[in-house]
């Protein structure tokens, strides 16, 4: 084993103690200072590289978060645009301070009707003459026809003077008078001329027929018939009610 001189031991002990002192108080040579600076530079470079590697993911996260914020802002902007468009549409519906939905729609034009009466065709008049009950039913279904049409709010019936009624009663049958129904309609100021014909085949088989002509066009605008079974007040009433409900009022004239 080689003995180490005491001077060298003393030098080593001094140097080891000197590292405990602040750098500014260390009596270092120029070479030692240069080496220490190089070591410190390498240490700092490594630290900076390590710090950079640790910070980069956070920066990427922030970048992605920023991108998501921009995307969310884009979506919000889109929603805002839709809201603006919806508001504009709603505003366009407002006219004079009233929403269009609240403005009542115009009612259909009420047409005036000149009702020329009910005729009765008794196929066996010579064998079974018309009874008072049948005459009463004729008047009853005439009033039923008018009341139901007026109740719909789409029709109104003009008044027919007594002299005109008398003329109709003694004249040719309505519908077979060469267009007299149109003339009566014009004379009475009606938009439509209407009449009803009840045909009695027997006490079991009857039919009710409704005719309506347009006075302006001078053409038939409605013709419909229903068969009834039984010559009673109830059968006549049900027949007329069905005809008006399911045919006349379902076919606007």
Image: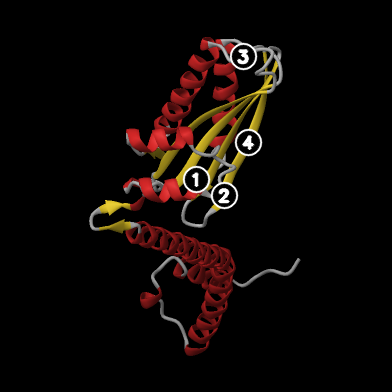
Left or right: where does residue 106 sit relative to residue 176? Answer: left
Q: Cα distance, mark 4 to mark 2?
A: 21 Å
Q: Residue 218, position in %: x, y?
A: 52, 55
Q: Is residue 60 above or below residue 179?
A: below
Residue behind mark 2: 178
Residue 35 in view, yes or no: yes
Nearer mark to the viewer, of 3 and 1:
3
Quarter of image, res 64? bottom right
Q: Residue at x 32, y 59 (%)?
A: 91
Q: Left or right: 116 with respect to 130?
A: left
Alpha-carbon span between mark 3 and mark 1? 27 Å
For the view shown, which residue lies furthest in the left direction? 97
Tell me whether circle 3 and circle 2 mark residues in contact (CB < 8 Å): no
Which quarter of the figure is the N terminus placed in? Answer: bottom right
Q: Secondary structure at mark 1?
A: helix
- Which residue shows up at 57% across the image and 49% down it? 178
- Tag shown at residue 129: 3
Residue underneath mark 4? 224
Residue nearer the viewer, 213 or 169? 169
Mark 2 or 1: in front is: 2
Can residue 249 be seen here?
A: no
Q: Return the disc, 3 or 4, that comes first in the chain's sequence.
A: 3
Rounded to the nearest angstrom, the CA distance separating label 2 from label 1 is 8 Å
Position in image of residue 51 (x %, y %): 54, 68
Which label lies toward us, 4 or 2? 2
Q: Secondary structure at mark 3?
A: loop
Q: Nearer the viewer, mark 3 or mark 4?
A: 3
């Amino acid at each position: 084993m080689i003995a180490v001189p005491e001077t060298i031991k003393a030098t080593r002990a001094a140097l080891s103690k000197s590292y405990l002192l602040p750098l500014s108080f260390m009596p270092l040579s120029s070479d030692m200072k240069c080496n220490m600076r190089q070591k410190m530079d390498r240490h700092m470079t490594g630290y900076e590289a390590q710090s950079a590697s640790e910070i980069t993911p956070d920066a990427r996260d922030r970048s992605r978060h920023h991108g998501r914020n921009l995307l969310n802002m884009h979506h919000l902007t889109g929603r805002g645009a839709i809201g603006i468009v919806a508001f504009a549409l709603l505003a366009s519906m407002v006219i004079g301070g009233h929403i269009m939905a609240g403005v009542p729609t115009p009612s259909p034009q009420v047409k005036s009707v000149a009702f020329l009466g009910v005729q009765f065709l008794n196929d066996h008049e010579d064998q079974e003459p018309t009874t008072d009950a049948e005459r009463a039913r004729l008047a009853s279904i005439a009033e039923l026809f008018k009341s139901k049409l007026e109740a719909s709010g789409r029709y109104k019936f003009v008044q027919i003077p007594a002299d005109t009624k008398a003329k109709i009663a003694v004249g040719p049958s309505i519908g077979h008078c060469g267009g007299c129904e149109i003339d009566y309609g014009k004379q009475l100021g009606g938009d439509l001329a209407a009449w009803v014909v009840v045909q009695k085949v027997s006490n079991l088989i009857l039919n009710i027929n409704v005719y309506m002509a347009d006075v302006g066009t001078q053409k038939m605008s409605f013709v419909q018939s229903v068969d009834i079974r039984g010559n009673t007040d109830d059968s006549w009433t049900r027949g007329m009610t069905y005809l008006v409900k399911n045919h006349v009022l379902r076919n606007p004239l």
